[in-house]
Image (cartoon, rainbow, N blue to C red):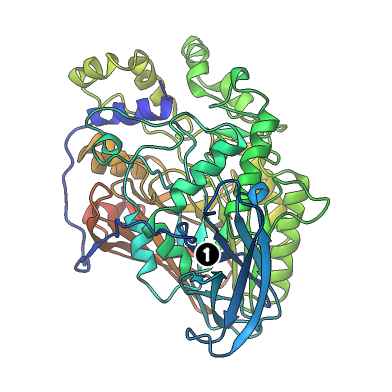
Amino acid sequence: MNSKLSRRHLLSGLGAATGLAACSAPAPQTFTSPDTARAGRFAHGIASGDPTTNAVILWTRISPNDASAGEIDVIWEVAATADFTSLIQSGVMTTFAARDWTVKVDATGLEAGATYYYRFRVGDQISPVGKTKTLPSGGVASARFAVVSCANWQEGFFNVYDHIGRQDHFDALIHLGDYYYEYGARDVEGTFAATQNRLHAPAHEIITLTDYRQRHAQYRSDAALQSATQNIAMISIWDDHETSNDSWRTGAENHDAGEGSWEDRKRAALRAYYEWMPIRDPQAGRAQDAIFRHYNYGDLLSLVTVETRLLARSEPLIIDDYFDMIREDGSTQRFNEILNDPDRDMLGEVQTQFIIDTLSKSKAQGQPWRMLANQVVMGRVMSPDLTPHVQEDALASIEKAWGGVREFVEISQYSLPTYPDSWDGYPAARDRFYDRLSKAGIEDILVVTGDAHEFWVNDLTHQSGKQMGVEIGTSSVSSNTLRDYMGPAAEDYALLMTQSNPDVRYYNPMLSGYIDLELTRQKGTARLIQVSTTQSRDYTAIEAARFALRHTTSGSLNVKSPKGLNLKQRALFHGLG
């Protein structure tokens, strides 16, 4: 049984939540996500991404009339207005079966900070018109991003994408990974996937190039995803599920020898990713998995997208494997020696130096913001002691599905990493990274994070206690949140988690959603937007919480002025718990 899932089931044993209403919550808005898939040559929609100051990637996929068709010529056009009366750039690209009929154009010769419209044509068929934007240069007053992660076709509708697609104020859509999931179809009676006939295709776990292409095609058929990517340029990185769950440099938790070579599977997954995503292929001589890159927003912001899965990551520890050791020792001393092994890595030297060089240049040029788009939780988040909170009847019930539940509750008193595949599973690597940043005079990083299906606001601190920055974590697009396993008790658990971790300022595992992040020269504003449900296409969207980000006179970054928190959350945010 998946240990992460098991632990979420365990937490349903916590007592019922208090359900305190949030303060100053804005009125929700009601929407309906579209259910009509596009047909014709452009059934998978269009997208743009990976912007520079003078170029942007334009993407589509042509549905061939005949699977045995030969080459197809596709006309692409870029214009300053939506009516295309005056073309800025145009050309012809030829696609074919060997690239799965995808079309990816690097439209160059554009102006910095400009909005453009684009479309594709095949014969007499014309794609929808998309809108995109290049990176700005020079003086920039503000930048605003939608930040998302974790879209699971089988666990919910993509209402988050729908809501983002309805906005017209975002400069880019930052996708932090788990763009799709590799698992096979979950045709279990009573589940969302079964009742909505929203099952993964192919039905088996994806392993081959054909499999990964088919899964991309399925997700790209979703009208809500198409609406979000049609009019907002994407800045994308992958997490683990684009290859396989809990992946690392030489393997993955969800890969075994019976599924063939890990290198072959990874190569297939990344080839499909580069075919189906609006992102530039790696430069000649650079590894496929070296996806890290830099986006410069004039004199305002340096954004670095990082790769923490395939390039350098050491194999994650599975804490369950160390239960007997910890029990026998009555302490975590031996486990911590293994956890803190200095050879355990996340970024690798080449990527680390790239980040340091980029952010050092940003600091020297006087940009106020240095931001990392990062896959997994970077802040210190230790599991709270559950022994006083889980009742015997809950243990007896959960034990039927998870024989190790009592052992896990017993071990929870030792304050172990909540997510050992996050940065908490690599504490020496994290402190080394912080040391390098600090030596370069950078102690104000803003990190946006996905993976956990929960909203987080964390202080980032070195083991010595030095403040290094602030982390804002986004919930999921549709992947199950903790509330889906715990029900209302997730509220109480969230308070316990916040109270038990000094670096956690706010934690919300209730609903799916995204971050609306706005940066100006004076401050940042992080709005945490929730959708009421992913189980129906009818949903409401609400700002669950809002936080201000400000630099101090000493140059560090602080999170302040919380809005939308209930009384207990507010007290814990201010360290009064």
Q: Residue at label 1? A: 47
Q: Quadrant of the N terminus?
A: top left
The amino acid beneath tag 1 is: Ala
Residue 422, image x, y percentages = 53, 39
Farthest residue toward the right?
Answer: 285
Write down the quadrant of residue 54 in the picture. Answer: bottom right
- Which of 145 and 458 lies nearest the eye of the viewer? 145
In the image, is 254 to the left or to the right of 499?
right
Q: Residues within 10 Å of mark 1 (few under 14, many from 20)?
A: many
Residue 134, image x, y percentages = 60, 76
- Which of 46 and 552 lies nearest the eye of the viewer? 46
Residue 346, image x, y percentages = 66, 40
Total marks shown come to 1
Whether residue 27 is visible, yes or no, is yes
- Determine whether the residue tagged by mark 1 lies in a helix, strand or loop: strand
Please name the residue shown 59% across and 60% down the image: 278
Please name the residue shown 35% across and 53% down the image: 158
Q: Is residue 502 above or below residue 472?
A: above
Residue 332, image x, y percentages = 52, 22
Q: Is residue 557 above or below residue 519?
A: above
- Which of 561 and 306 lies nearest the eye of the viewer? 306
Please name the residue shown 55% across and 58% down the image: 62
Write down the quadrant of residue 414 in the picture. Answer: top left
Write down the quadrant of residue 491 in the picture. Answer: top left
